[in-house]
Structure formats: structure tokens, C-alpha cells
Image: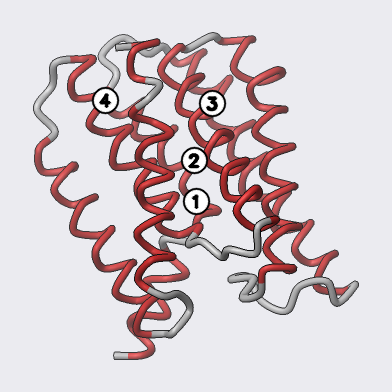
Amino acid sequence: MTRFLKVISYIFHPLFIPIGGTLAYFAIAPYSSLAQQSGNILPIFILTVIIPIIFFLILKNLKLVTSVFAPTIQERKYPLLISIALYLMILYKVIPQNYISELYFFFVGLLTASVSLFVLLLLKFKTSIHLLGMGSLLLFLVGLSIHFEVNITIAIGMATLLSGLVATSRLYLKAHTTPELVIGFIVGACSQLFLFKFWL
């Protein structure tokens, strides 16, 4: 059981949420072009997966972090600051070249949620970044379903189920307390929900 839940924590690591949301958009959007896909997917993958992994290796070599899960409050500050900088880069350099309002506000939501978690860290409160990511992705899927008027109930149901599974894994592995998980999910979900009025 422990090994299975560790695998869940790795597979649904917040590192993969931005590219997951991007792929979900292009899978659901009925009118996305090949140019939009190639102009967004690869740069977003590089900026949200490859570069953070490189930064993690550098931080680990400098002994500023000990694990990809950044267990302490101090360790979490570095990945969050890097994420905030990369989200800003995506919003100013990547998406404007092939402007897609849905993706733009998805990343605005991720940026808002990351800044909120960083503020909580400054207040010495540790929050689950895993659940922030799952909450963001789940509400983004709900928004896409409403926006494009497509029935993706199975995908939304799976995202809900997986959110619960990720929460269970983080609790079982003693990485977080229940309030830390709940607040992380709420911050992620609300950061997307409050932006619906700009693109729905």
C-alpha cells in the first residue's frame, strides 16, 4: 500500500498539472489548430516540467532541498518562487503568441494560487501543493465542459476520484494534515472558479 501511494504522489506531482491542463484543453477544444498546439504544448512542457527539474537538481546539489516533495516550509519557498516566475514567463511570452483565453486564465489561476500559497508559507503555514494542483485541474475541466458545452462527466468524475486518492496518499504518508490538504484544494479550486467570469 505504501509503495502504491508513493507512486500516486509522484504521478500526480504538481509539476505535471500545468501540462496536464494544457493537454486537457487541446483534447476538449473543438477548434484548436495544429499551430496553436505546437506553439503552446512544447514551450509549456519545457517551462513547467524540464526547467523545474533542472532547478530541483541545482537546489538539491546546493542542499537547499532534500526531496521532490519539499517537506519543510523553508524548502517549499524555492520551488514556489520558481513556479511563480515560470508562470509569469508563460503568461507574457508563450500564450500571447498564440493567444488562447482559456489557457491564459488557467495559468493566471495557477499563478494566483501559487502566490497565495507563498504568502501562507511566509505566515508559517504549510499547504498541500498536490491538492492545489488537483483542485485547479478539476475546476478547469468543469469550466471547459461549460464553456464548450461538451459532456466530459467521466473526466470530471475521474479528476474528483483522483483528487481524493492523492489526498489519501498525502495523509497516509504523513506529508500533510487534513487542514493543509483541504486549504490547498480550496485555494486551487477557487483560483480557477473566480476567473470563470473572464472566459466563460
Q: Could you say which is closer to the camera, residue 66 or residue 19?
A: 66
Q: Residues within 10 Å of mark 4 (few under 14, many from 20)?
A: many
Which residue, given by chain and number where applicable, does mark 4 sit on? 143
Which residue, given by chain and number where applicable, does mark 3 sit on? 108
Q: Quadrant of residue 197?
A: top left
Dot 1 falls on a residue whose secondary structure is: helix
Disc 4 residue type (three-letter): Gly
Number of the front mark, 3 or 1: 3
**x and y percent of residue 189 in the render?**
35, 40
Asked if the residues shown at circle 3 and circle 1 are in contact, with their CB atoms under 8 angstroms apart, the answer is no
**Left or right: 98, with 152 as reference point:** right
Disc 3 residue type (three-letter): Val
The residue at 46%/47% (across/down) is: 17
**x and y percent of residue 12 in the render?**
41, 60
Which residue, given by chain and number where applicable, does mark 2 sit on? 19
Q: Residues within 10 Å of mark 1 (few under 14, many from 20)?
A: some
Asked if the residues shown at circle 1 and circle 4 are in contact, with their CB atoms under 8 angstroms apart, the answer is no
**x and y percent of residue 102 in the render?**
41, 18
Which residue, given by chain and number where applicable, does mark 1 sit on? 16
Disc 2 residue type (three-letter): Ile
**x and y percent of residue 187 in the render?**
43, 45
Mark 3 → mark 2, Cα distance in angstroms: 14 Å
Of the image marks 4 and 3, the number of the one nearer the N terminus: 3
Numbered circle sitting on residue 162: none
Mark 1 → mark 2, Cα distance in angstroms: 6 Å
The colour style of the image is secondary structure
